Image (cartoon, rainbow, N blue to C red):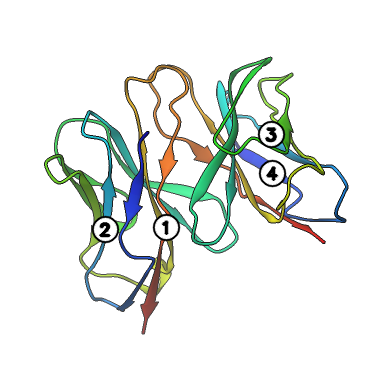
Amino acid sequence: AQSVTQLDSQVPVFEEAPVELRCNYSSSVSVYLFWYVQYPNQGLQLLLKYLSGSTLVKGINGFEAEFNKSQTSFHLRKPSVHISDTAEYFCAVSDPYLQGAQKLVFGQGTRLTINP
Amino acid sequence: DGGITQSPKYLFRKEGQNVTLSCEQNLNHDAMYWYRQDPGQGLRLIYYSQIVNDFQKGDIAEGYSVSREKKESFPLTVTSAQKNPTAFYLCASRPGQGANEQYFGPGTRLTVT
């Protein structure tokens, strides 16, 4: 079964500094990868996704992620964060060969806190 | 406005009572999902449904039940058999063939005392 590990449960960063949120997945076969953001007491919003093609994926709000197959990683980055980026971020994986269900397996989440 | 609606936002129940959480979508999506979120554990899949009148257990289905009588609606019942029902519950949906990402509702926070 697939699993996702988000290596940091909490990441504090100063405003305008760069940030990287780390995500590793277990499967060595083809996968679909996603990053979602959750603001307090809200649902999840898709930031970006990797299905195939270019390993550098750009998303909303200035975020990007790089797919690294050899390291089974999909780290999320932003060059300069804002107070409004304070939220919880989830990495998720699904199996492209599993027709129909497209179940997502989520990591435990990383709480990003931006300090002024 | 298209989207996923979950109601109510906050729900309080006494232990031993069944409670039903509502999830409605007007996106014409085929698949729908229920997740449970606990602090530090990410999201765990409870049940999912790919078409009307069909649904499958997820990873933590014990103590929960669902129905899918209409494409737009996927209610979740938390039964008295669920040992730790207090949690944040999220409903999601996904379009049919060729779509990969799931779209999430705003969630319902259930507190059982």
Q: Counting residues from the N terminus, which is met first, the one under dot 4 or under dot 3?
A: 4
- Mark 2 on the same chain as mark 1: yes
User: Helix or strand or loop: what does disc 3 sit on?
Assistant: strand
The secondary structure type at the circle numbered 4 is strand
Which numbered dot is residue B40? none
Disc ID at residue A22 = 2
- The 10 Å Cα crowd at callout 1, few under 14, some 14 to 19, many 20 or more, is many
* Residue to which mark 3 is pinned: B24
Q: Which residue is labeled 1 in the image?
A: A109
Report how far apart the C-alphas of labels 1 and 4 lie in the structure: 22 Å
Q: Quadrant of residue B71?
A: top right
Is there a contact, CB below 8 Å, between mark 3 and mark 1? no
The chain that hosts pointer 1 is A
Q: Secondary structure at mark 2?
A: loop
- Amino acid at pointer 2: Arg
Is residue B48 rendered to the left or right of residue A22?
A: right
- Tag 4: amino acid: Gln
Q: Residues within 10 Å of mark 2 (few under 14, many from 20)?
A: some
**Among the two numbered marks 2 and 1 on one chain, the one whose residue lies closer to the N terminus:** 2
Q: Which of the 4 image quarters holds residue A102?
A: top left
In front: A17, or B2?
A: A17
Residues at marks 3 and 1, common chain?
Answer: no
- The 10 Å Cα crowd at callout 3, few under 14, some 14 to 19, many 20 or more, is many
